[in-house]
Amino acid sequence: MAKLTLKERFKKSTSGSGESAKAGKFATSIFRPGSPFRKGYTDSPRNRSYVVMNNVLYHLHPVKVKRHGVRLSYTLCLGGMSFFLFIVLTITGIWLMFYFRPTEMAYADIQALQTSVAFGSLVRNMHRWGAHLMVLVVFLHMSRVFYHGAYKAPREFNWVIGVILLFLTLFLSFTGYLLPWDQLAIWAVTVGGNMASYTPVFGAQIKFGLFAGLEATTATLLRFYVLHVLFFPFIIVIFMAIHFWRVRKDGGISGPL
Amino acid sequence: MVDIPEHLLLRSAEARAKALGISVEQALSEMKGESTPTVVEEEPEVIEVELVTPPEAEVPAPVETPVVEEVKAEAPAPVETPVVEEVKAEAPAPVEVEAPAPTKAAAPAPAKADTPEEVEFAPEVKVTQRLLTVVKAKPIQKAASEPVDKVNTWPHLMLPEFISLMVMMAFLIILSAILQAPLLEEANPNITPNPAKAPWYFLGLQEALSYWDPQIAGVMIPLVIGLIGFAAIPYIDRNKENNPSKRKYAIMMYTFFLAGAGTLTIIGVLFRGPGWNWTYPWIDGIWFDDLLDWINFE
């Protein structure tokens, strides 16, 4: 066995990965050392790790995952889909905010959006169907986790976070429901608000706080708008961060069964 | 028996050769048990070196000291020549033999061999050295979990993820291109539609409200069962098994819940008409405006 110095060994292990300066100085300043964008990619375990480690989004993932966990039939990708739908909803939602005023003009704005804004109708549809889909997918994700017994130790608390995320998703969807300011929106929210008013002791106060008054008015619209575009997204992002972090800290994906 | 790497063996042989004044090949063959080991005439004192904690463990008792791990079964030193034992696993190149300072501190004859070229570090002791063992690099603590079968995230996880993400995106765009989101007349607090329905995910609740007291259906179910009950599931279900056949009760309960919630929601969406009366969607149509365009889709 030939003796190699550390330097020689390092050279040997990195040769063939095209570390010859592919990227210029500017690109080098963007990508971290070891990034495949900086030194090129040839398939090797080392470079496979670098792909994950050197990208802020990818490194939500660990470098390696359990083999059974990558089977699509195990997770059905439901958690990832929930997150992806949330991102789609954030992007389309920000886009919609350009054309929407949470005032008496709300309904006219939606009409104008659908008729005279390029892709306005498509983006609105994506936001609405995506929201329904997200409620569904989050619920399915919870069911998947339950049937796999994935809430058991040490993942108990992450399940609690997940239940909170489900309710935040429902609140997000519910507050968004009012924003088109049509008959469907106002009466669905009225029904929902009446349900909340059955809360013992504080029922009336909860409804008053939710509606900013005794019934759904434009004040309610503004309130729901702020809750929908700022408050709940802010909260849900915090809980999502904890949720993802705990997935890894609690030992990655559960199972195998 | 630990398989000693060739270069460590060689290094050890070099040290032994230097100490005994024999050739390296000779020492090597002795260590491999191919030739009889060189016997040193003088009787040295035994220096005992404990492998784990060198400074404290120096026991000058002559022969029987059970502490040292005798892994090297070959190189059987004769009984009448006690061998000075040194931890050679990471001994440096044979030039600086004075390097193992902690072991030397344990020697009873405190001969300070400060001069580097002087190999003999205890004048009256003829030093023989041999490789005791190679300590494999492993954690001090034993890991609680067994190693599991893992694959690289890239590409084995990220590629399927990316594909399903694209499929979902395509599905959403196509859905949004075909199905128009509902937009009824402008909100008017003075005109109450009949029936007034909540969003579909609350329609199971609304349906339950038509059976039970609102305090129960409107508050107990969503808050106590929905939020607190669900969040408490892992603390109620202390069964550690996650194999479905060993947690039939939990699965049964959840499936009952799913079936119940699903049934209530479907009834609320499809089978309730004006005055919250029972209607059949195939006779009376669907009284749920959120789905209008799903039904009128041509």
Image (spheres, coloured by chain):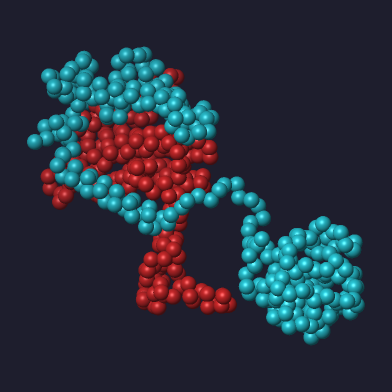
Chain colours: A red, B cyan
Q: Give the image location of residue A65, x and y in percent.
A: 44, 51
Badge count = 0
Q: Give the image location of residue B68, x and y in percent.
A: 79, 60
- Which residue shows up at 50% across the image and 36% down it? A152
- Which residue shows up at 25% across the image and 43% down it? A127
- Which residue shows up at 43% across the image and 36% down it? A148
- Which residue shows up at 19% across the image and 26% down it? B288
Residue A21 image-quadrant placement: bottom left
Which is more toward the observer, A115 or A25?
A: A25
In the image: residue B248, left or right of residue B15 = left
The outermost residue toward the front is B35
Residue B64 image-quadrant placement: bottom right
Which is more toward the observer, B276 or B30?
A: B30
Q: Is residue B97 visible?
A: yes
In the image: residue B279, left or right of residue A74 = left
In the image: residue B297, left or right of residue B59 = left
Instruction: Locate the N terminus of chain B by quadrant.
Output: bottom right
Instruction: Locate the C terminus of chain B by quadrant.
Output: top left
Which is more toward the observer, B21 or A230?
A: B21
Q: Does residue A129 sit above or below A117 in this rendering? A: above
Q: Does residue B125 sit above or below A139 in this rendering? A: below
Q: Does residue B181 sit above or below B216 in this rendering? A: below
Q: Does residue A164 sit above or below B265 in this rendering? A: below
Q: Give the image location of residue B45, x and y in percent.
A: 89, 70
Which is more toward the observer, B131 or B212?
A: B131
Q: Give the image location of residue B35, x and y in percent.
A: 73, 75
Residue A30 image-quadrant placement: bottom left
